Amino acid sequence: MNQRIAQHKHCRTCGKAFVGEGRYCSETCERSNEETLRKKKRQLLILYLVSVLIMIGAVVLSVM
Ligand SMILES: [Zn+2]
């Protein structure tokens, strides 16, 4: 009875329970999760660039 619970996994994208290898229930979920991660990375990069620009702006303003 417990074996069944131990063997199934939850998909990282849709949260559905599935049996098998990997972290996703299907290739579609794997791909869409990769896309989400890529978007998040880009958002972080933009956030980083914006904060750097703000810092540079603050330094320039304090010098002037
Ligand atoms: Zn899924």
Image (spheres, grey):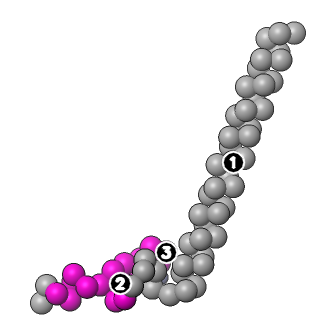
Magenta residues, start to end: 3-20
Q: Which residue is mark 2?
A: 17
Q: Tell me how far mark 1 sits from mark 3, CA to CA.
A: 23 Å
Q: Amino acid at mark 1?
A: Leu
Determine crowd level at label 3: few under 14, some 14-19, many 20+ residues with C-alpha closer than 10 A: some
Residue 30 in the image: x percent, y percent? 54, 79
Counting residues from the N terminus, which is met first, the one under dot 1 or under dot 3? 3
Q: Which residue is mark 1?
A: 45
Q: Image check: 59 left or right of 23?
A: right
Q: Regarding mark 2 in the picture, which secondary structure is present there? A: strand
Q: Which residue is mark 3?
A: 13
Give the foreground label among 1 and 2: 1
x 83%, y 15%: residue: 61
Q: Image check: 43 left or right of 37?
A: right
x 59%, y 71%: residue: 34
Which quarter shows the C terminus? top right
Vertical order, 38 against 58 (above or below)? below
Q: How many marks?
A: 3
Q: Tell me how far mark 1 sits from mark 2, CA to CA.
A: 33 Å
Distance from mark 3 CB to nearest ligand 1 atom below 8 Å: yes
